[in-house]
Image: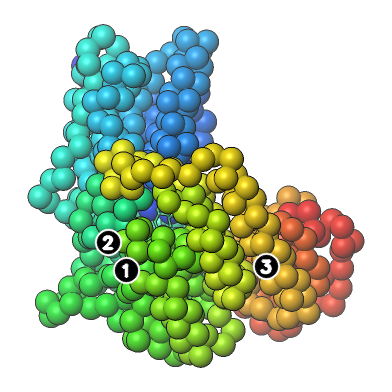
Amino acid sequence: MPHDVREPGNARKIYVRSFGCQMNVYDAQRMTDTMAKEGYVETDKPDDADLIILNTCHIREKAAEKVYSELGRLRVAQEEAGRKPMVAVAGCVAQAEGAEIIKRARMVDLVVGPQSYHKLPELVALAQEKHGQHKKGIVETEFPVEDKFDFLAPPTKQAIAKRGPTAFVTVQEGCDKFCTFCVVPYTRGAEVSRPLGRLLDEVKRLADGGVREVTLIGQNVNAYHGLDDHGRSANLAELMARVAEVPGIARIRYTTSHPRDMDDELIAAHRDMPQLMPYLHLPVQSGSDRILDAMNRKHGREAYFELVAKVRAARPDIAFSSDFIVGFPGETDADFADTLDLVDKVGFAGAFSFKYSPRPGTPAATLGAQVPEAAMNERIYALQALLDKQKAAFDAACRGRRFDILLEKPGRLPGQLIGRSPYLQSVVVLAPREAIGTLASVVIRDVSTKSLSGDIVAGEFWPEGVPAGANLVRQDEQLEA
Ligand code: SAM
Ligand code: SF4
């Protein structure tokens, strides 16, 4: 008799470990939901699992190599424990390296690219037949004609509640921009937008499960152009306007945007839509026109300045974050000085910065004039020092300000909850656990490098007013989130 995991008491356990971007977090949840329908129960312990999925990232060499060190660790753990769960490698490394993964790590039963996650149940069943028989694993890296989103299972109400009051929703996938350093157009494929009606259904389901904040995600999210119910193409501003009407949804964010796709309607949404948070991640990568051109970013530094000014005019309290690459091939000291100058002029509340990593198959990987490691190190230290200084100044200026905070989860110390400010800062407050999922109006009292802390002065959980003394706590305790 085959082992039927759907029989009560027979549940197998699935462990998914995600690397990389928010798209992978979303994909991990969809894979877990899809396998839950097959009777698999989620576990957060790999030692406990019958199926382990490593959901990988290929954006930089270091990220890609992580999968092999993780596989090595898993092999040792399996040998010590004397059990052999099935192992699947998913995500962008799976797409880029395919069968090579099985050659390098024979313990892998299944390699599955991001466009085939809806086939997981059948692929896992097929791999299961070969598992433990010294047969080669299965590789599925096609870009199928059907849309995986039509087949991936939605989360149950319990799964939504367990994941908390914020959620990601993938609205667009893939990219047609072909920046010369980037693997995304090759691993995730061409830009595809999901239909608006399906997205609204997904947001309504999340809101029914208690979600208050959605982040609409995509590799190039502001290029969104999904079809509405009349077969008309809708842009991101239109999608957000509809999402804002969903009862329960109090906050909307979107990421990651390309400067070229910030259209006037989207900028106006920052002025007109109170649910849209005043924090915009707008990667610029470099401040040098020469390098921006070599990167094929399709805009120069002046265009970026103009865009920032336009968005600030629409929403004066907006803050920006960005991505930067240092050491792109051919980058000189003068080019890098332009990047520092751009950072200085714009002023960022947060940012990610990376050393250029050549990715196989991308045009920049074969360019001459690769920048020596020592110069790259110097530049990244200088850039990060400036960005850290700007972030610290932005955070310090929040002291005394009053923000709405969405309370998300318990803090480290008893009585604490952690929420997020409109600017995505972690804010520690004192509040009962039952207040998770509600908005609280908080005056920021203290600022540390990791988080802010403050006093609740009003909030959805306290319709009659916050009880006197509710915020009393030693300051040093409150800051330790
Ligand atoms: N779509 C986004 C955009 O237009 O900027 C970015 C997507 S990518 C997943 C996230 C960031 O990784 C990029 O903004 C870039 O800074 C960085 N990145 C991408 N390829 C890289 C490479 N080859 N080396 C270093 N950093 C890279
Ligand atoms: Fe990669 Fe973003 Fe450029 Fe697309 S727009 S190629 S995802 S960096």
Identified at 18% across, 77% down, the residue is: 233
Q: Is residue 416 left or right of residue 223?
A: right
Q: Nearer the N terminus, badge 3 or badge 1?
A: 1
Callout 3 environment at 10 Å: few (<14), some (14 to 19), or many (20+)? some
Q: Nearer the viewer, residue 442 or 218?
A: 218
Question: Residue 469 bears which disc, if any?
Answer: none
* Marks 2 and 1 close (CB-CB < 8 Å): yes
Identified at 35% across, 50% down, the residue is: 181
Q: Looking at the image, is mark 2 or mark 1 nearer the viewer? A: 1
* Residue 154 appears in view: no
Residue bearing mark 1: 298
Question: Residue 177 bears which disc, if any?
Answer: 2
Identified at 64% across, 62% down, the residue is: 387
Q: Tell me residue 270's x, y (percent).
A: 45, 84
Which amino acid type is marked by label 3? Answer: Gln
* Marks 3 and 2 close (CB-CB < 8 Å): no
Which amino acid type is marked by label 1? Answer: Lys
Q: Is residue 101 left or right of residue 63?
A: left
